Image (cartoon, rainbow, N blue to C red):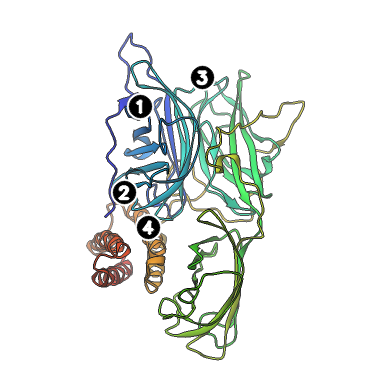
Amino acid sequence: MRCLAGLLSFAVLALVAPAGAAAATPASVTMFSESGDYIGGGVQRTFDTGVAGDLVSTSVDAAGQSLGVSVSGGPYGDSYGMSFVAPSGPLAPGVYTGAQRSPFREPGRPGMEITGDGRGCNTLSGSFEVRDLARAADGSVERAWVVYEQHCDGGPALFGEVRVGAPAAAGPRTAPTLVRWPALDVNGGGQAVPVTVWPSVAITEVAVVGEAAADFVVRVNDCTGAAAVCEVWVRFLPLTPGTRRAWLRLTDAAGGRTDVPLQGFAYGGETGLTMTGDPGDYIGAGRTWTYGPESRISGGGSRSGMHFSIDGANGDWWYLDFVPADGDVLAPGTYNGATRYPFNGTGPGLSISGEGRGCNQLSGSFTVNELTFSGSAVKSVSISFEQHCEHAAPALRGTIKVRAGDRTTPAPWMVGGSPPDDPGIPPTKSNPSVAPSTPAPPAAPLIPVLGGGSTPAAAPTVASAARRTERSARRLRMAGRLLSRARVSTIRSAANAVATDLRAYRKALGRSGTRSQRAAVKKITSSLRTLRRALTRYEKGQNRRAAKRTIARSIKTIRTSARRL
């Protein structure tokens, strides 16, 4: 079951001060959610104590090991809780990588957890950087600055900033005060996010400055000429591998200037999938399929098996699985005699399926060209394959690559134990490096942003939201066909995508839905809840046969109900 971590009581920092009282400590929290993230739901949120109704509260436990954060209000009136825990001893400024869910973290690992709006993660991975943390004499939090990134159940990222007690800005006040995107592949596209600005006088100029200014694109600028609260939406589109830095520069009519650090990292190497089906091949349908960094290509596993999912920028979707024979491991070389995973018995396993098509039986082979790890995480991989669906002569041949050949040095905030990152000094007039504030739109399509003020993407109609939900349900069905312990995270991610699209559908539907539509929404919601519980039981080995039946039944109900939206 998805559980919400119980957070300690918090010392409230964001209450309206009575007349004559000292001003409350300024605080803001940003939550930027990629499409498919379960916790944030693909919606961008900012909580700021300068906004009526927004509350931000914090606390540190008695040992000083854990920082708790609670927020409420924001653009949608919802509430969230956060926790950041040191591996041992007091929480101190520095970089914490390899974080696990706080209540269940392994010894020596940092912990974190972001929950709210009735949602929490079964498992999570993430990292956070404590840039500043200070306590007052009474033990309350005087200053806190945390930049974080969380992946729920192996899915897309929820990332942002916690800032308490920031010094007054020389120019317009902003939230966040620093934007750091999750790592991407070079030429990929990050989530467009809003920087909210509270000017005291009119904004006269908005620009991105710095050596890597071209990698950070202003998608929406509502601030030039504005004297009231406004937003600038920025997107990370890396053109060069490595650590990328720039600043969003905001200048006002009084000569005040605020530079918001923009940070990102791009992996090098090659990332993509290319495959060609012979005439008569059921999966490839006699054509060539090509996907690059503009698509979402994710892979994971170990030397016991590699599993990939592709969410094409054009809406295509695929799953790929490669496992060695019993007792063997994945290493450079060719694996012959592969049969359909996960029904491959003691021999090598292979499966390429998607777009509503899969093999009942297959034969084939695959070659591991490259497979490297950084600790337990996959660093780079390249696998070529040949698959014969139903043992027929026509074949599907191709190669999947994720950062193949990458030797890029990680960014400072990606190395655990490092001190807080120094963002550097913004350029001056004597050393200019400025990108225009409204460049031409990039070739890569925008990742949809659902809600959150002035967005680069329009809100979906009922019909389009229904189509997206139905398509997500089809992907879930395909993911469920290959149930195994190694694929549980893939099925969870597919279920999370259904939940995200269903929330967008409910929002578009409003109160105008028919009884049949409302019943379908209720049925899908209930089945998703049952599915998540069954996946947890299956993963833990608790009556796995019964759990498998429940998983299949829940997925079928979700698929059937999605057709009725």
- Dot placed on the residue nearer the N-terminal end, 1 or 2: 1
Q: Nearer the viewer, residue 218 or 420?
A: 420
How many angstroms separate mark 1 from mark 3 (CA)?
19 Å
Name the residue carrying label 4.
496
Label located before the other in sequence (1 or 3): 1
Q: Foreground mark, 1 or 2?
A: 2
Q: CA distance from mark 4 to mark 2?
A: 11 Å
Mark earlier in primary sequence (1, 4)? 1
Mark 1 Cα-neighbour bin, 10 Å: few <14, some 14–19, many ≥20: few
Question: In the displayed structure, does residue 227 sit left or right of residue 158?
Answer: right
Q: Amino acid at mark 3?
A: Ala
* Mark-to-mark CA distance, 2 and 3: 35 Å
| CA–CA distance in space, label 1 to label 4 | 32 Å
Question: Looking at the figure, which quarter contains the C terminus?
Answer: bottom left
Disc marking residue 168 = 3
Find numbered disc 1 in the image and state the secondary structure of the residue it sits on: loop
**Residues under labels 4 and 3: Cα distance?**
40 Å
Q: Earlier in the sequence, mark 4 or mark 2?
A: 2
> Callout 3: helix, strand or loop?
loop
Q: Position of residue 507 (x, y in %)?
A: 34, 51
**Residue visible at 27% across and 30% down in the picture:** 9
Tag on residue 52? 1
Q: Residue 367: in sight, yes or no?
A: yes
Q: Callout 2: helix, strand or loop?
A: loop
Three-letter code for the amino acid on which mark 4 is drawn: Asn
Q: Position of residue 28 (x, y in %)?
A: 43, 30
Q: Which residue is mark 2?
A: 119
